[in-house]
Image (cartoon, grey):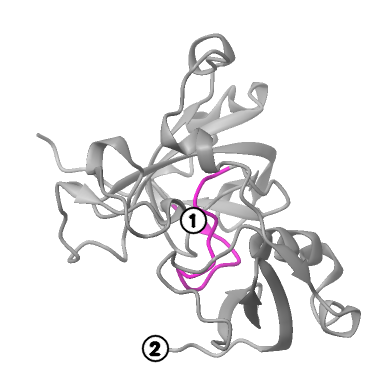
Amino acid sequence: MEKIRTIAWIRSDFPEKFGIPRQSGIIEELKAEIVFEKEFRDPNCILGLEEFSHLWLIWAFSENEKAGWSPTVIPPRLGGRIHKGVFATRSPFRPNPIGMSCVRLESIEMTRDNGPVLHVLGADLLDRTPILDIKPYIRYTDCHPDAVSGFADRVKDYRLEVVFPEELLEKLPESKRAAAVKILEEDPRPAYQNDPARRYGTAFAGWDIRYHVKDKVLTVCEVVPYQSRA
């Protein structure tokens, strides 16, 4: 098999994995950019792409390459105790570290230095994630309204109530506030962590949002400039 190449990289507001939505498209307010590698910056490569509203991104779990895999995983939404087969989940710990995301194509910008840059909405990717391929989403084949989603259907409506004091929310750029609240509503914590006294931190858009959770209520207690935890 010919070696798979990186065709592009994504620029997103997530410098860390913690806090990234568990599925693409859940938070459409999330903005990201796709910048092509030099070899693929020929505008002919995307000729006709502007006719589509949504795209499939095929990408690599670049932070999980050495993590290995297991035949079963524990989906976080199921309480951290129930095992499911790896191929019945979208766990990042897979035999091949490959992910896929469906995103909305907001616009295509022709730039002098980077060629065509794709502006997308709803991406669930870490900043600098390598993109392996891009394919158009085709409604009449890719959309199945009668599809059954197994255990995922049982937890799709799970949300936290978010208390985000106005003086802290206003520290974030106005264009990022709605997305930040929705990220927190999705409950970024691992399912096995449920200590109401524990303070968590989610890095987003250059800020570290710190909070605690009790009885399904998430309360933001601090917003400070992000500093890498590495």
The foreground one among 125 and 111 is 125
- Indicate the quadrant where residue 171 lies: bottom right
Image quadrant holding the N terminus, namely: top left
Image quadrant holding the C terminus, namely: bottom left
Q: Position of residue 107 (x, y in %)?
A: 71, 40
Q: Which residues are magenta?
A: 9-24
Q: Position of residue 44 (x, y in %)?
A: 51, 29
Q: Position of residue 178 (x, y in %)?
A: 79, 60
Q: Residue at x 58, y 58 (%)?
A: 113
Q: Is the residue 106 above or below the residue 228 in the image?
A: above
What residue is shown with label 1?
125
Q: Is the residue 50 above or below the residue 130 in the image?
A: above
Q: CA distance from mark 2 to mark 1?
A: 19 Å
Q: Residue at x 54, y 44 (%)?
A: 24
What residue is shown with label 2?
230
Q: Is residue 94 visible?
A: no
Drawn side of residue 109 relative to residue 81, left or right:
right
The three-letter amino acid code for the residue at tag 2 is Ala
Q: Is residue 104 visible?
A: yes
The foreground one among 173 and 131 is 173
The three-letter amino acid code for the residue at tag 1 is Leu
Instruction: Verify whether residue 165 appears in magenta.
Output: no
Q: Tell me, for residue 43, which label it has, or none.
A: none
